[in-house]
Amino acid sequence: MSTDNHNNKDSTTSENEASAKPKSKKIKIILITLLALVLAVGGGLGFLLYKKNHKTETPPNKQEEVLKQPIKTINLDKFVVNLVGGDGESLGKYLQAEIALEYREAAVEEAIKTKTPHIKNEIISILSEKSAAELTTLEAKEEIKISIQDSINEIIGVSQQSDNAKEDEHNSEEHPIYVGVSDVLFTSFIIQ
């Protein structure tokens, strides 16, 4: 009987070992899965918290900064130009105009003073290409103002519309101009 008893113990022990092996495999798989899940969730939360506390702030747009500055005005000399007739010939009519320029950046005033002869030449060219009839409508005056504004901004070297604008030959690297002349004002406009 003692042999049977001993055989029963061995069979019970081997049954326990056999059932313990599948249970330990299941437990290991569950533990590894839980550990991977905890690490993934923890890593994701850690990343989100890091991004929240270390936001990559983009530098403010230079144009937006400039547009917050007060408007300044610079007066140009009086312009007197001969106007062309309908056939391109001068009919003895002339335009007398006084022009003021609005701007916000300090560098614009310096650039205008430096480039004054070029600016005046361009304004005279733009105005003298017109006839008296062309200058009588508000639309024509607005077109001339836009043309003058664009020409002056080109002369003084207004940077492109982005912060990474390339410098051109008119613009100094130390004082880039982002907005330039914002408006052209006719303070006097007489056709005779």
Image (spheres, grey):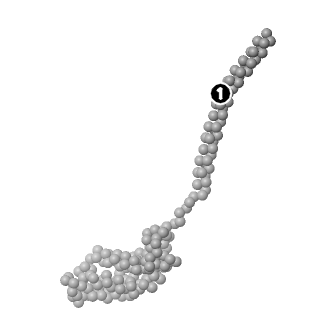
Task: Judge whether residue 121 can be spotted in this image.
Answer: yes
Residue 35, located in which quarter of the rendered image?
top right
Kindly give the residue lying farthest to the bottom in the view shown.
92
Residue at screen point 61% across, 47% down? 43
Give the image location of residue 57, x and y in percent.
Answer: 55, 61
The residue singled out by tag 1 in the image is: 22
Task: Judge whether residue 149 can be spotted in this image.
Answer: no
Tag 1 secondary structure: helix
Q: Residues within 10 Å of mark 1 (few under 14, many from 20)?
A: few
Residue at screen point 26% across, 81% down? 130
Give the image location of residue 39, x and y in percent.
Answer: 63, 44
Residue at screen point 24% across, 85% down? 84
* Location of residue 6 with respect to 190 vertically, above or below: above
Q: Quadrant of the N terminus?
A: top right
- Side of 143 relative to 74 (left or right): left
Give the image location of residue 100, x and y in percent.
Answer: 39, 82
Viewer-side residue, 76 vs 115: 115
Viewer-side residue, 190 vs 162: 162
